[in-house]
Amino acid sequence: MPPPDILLEEYPAPGVVVLRLNRPEVLNALNLDLRLQLAESFDRLDGDDAVRTIVLAGGARAFCAGADLNEYVDATPTDIVARDMGRLWDAIARCRKPVIAAVRGHALGGGCELAMHADILLAADTASFGQPEVLLGLMPGGGATQRLTRAVGKFKAMKLLLAGDRIPADQACAMGLVSEIVPDAELEAYALDLAGRLARGPRLAQQFIKEAVIESMNTSLAQGLAFERKSFQLLFDTEDKRRGIRARLEKTAAVFDR
């Protein structure tokens, strides 16, 4: 298990796991150890059939304030290449389970990029977001130029990326970066309730939905529609489909395969 001063794992409900960043002294900044542990945790949880939904959380002051600059100040290009950061980010991006980010406080730089790797991004009303790498003479390296642009469009993304602005949760939600805003004191309970609902849902249908949405960002409309149709057709051979339709016809609650 990861050391508790770096990353905590909590199991608050059947099928739900909370990964909590826990470096409060540096606002949960991402050092290499934490990045490695996140990748390892996502790989392991993705392969665990008992895990249905993952909630990614931080602390009250910060979800994650970005990269740990102590590791960057004297780093050379070869040092950064050797870290193989794409592999570590990909471990999160390729997770087949629904991932919910519950953001309180700052989500900046790599922290904002980490939140954007989730499938559902819930924000406390006190949260803030931004990509301030340009203010350090750098640019995002964890996907913001791609994911942020897809989420909010070219012009809003360019403003955030080029100016390094920090924006509050309501503005982030209005531009499409955030799924929903929840009062700070209620955010994690709300995220856990949603995670529990997803954990009780049809596993394969959720996986296919996630794959199809991600496919839509990487292919043409025609290819995405073909992918969706094939996935839709395959679900007709699942017990969950039969249970779901029978329950709807009988006006009862569906209980899907665990």
Image: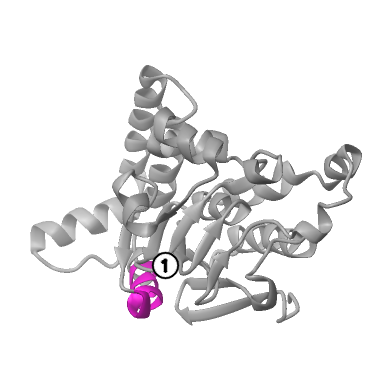
Which residue is at the front of the view, 62 or 223? 62
Q: Which residues are magenta?
A: 184-195
Q: How is the image coloured?
A: one colour
Q: Position of residue 155 (x, y in %)?
A: 41, 29
Of the 4 image quadrants, the one containing the C terminus is: bottom left
For residue 220, side relative to residue 175 (left or right): right
Q: Residue at x 41, y 75 (%)?
A: 188
Residue 130 inside the magenta-drawn segment: no
Up the image or down, 215 lies above or below 104; here it is above
Q: Residue at x 42, y 19 (%)?
A: 220
Up the image or down, 19 lies above or below 111; here it is below
Residue 128, located in which quarter of the rendered image? bottom left
Which residue is at the front of the view, 82 or 119? 82
- Residue 52 in sight: no
Q: Which residue is mark 1?
A: 258
Q: Residue at x 52, y 74 (%)?
A: 61
Q: Position of residue 60 (x, y in %)?
A: 50, 77
Q: Position of residue 126 (x, y in %)?
A: 39, 68
Provide the secondary structure element on which disc 1 rests: loop
Q: Position of residue 172 (x, y in %)?
A: 37, 51
Residue 188 inside the magenta-drawn segment: yes
Of the 4 image quadrants, the one containing the N terminus is: bottom right
Q: Main secondary structure of the magenta part?
A: helix
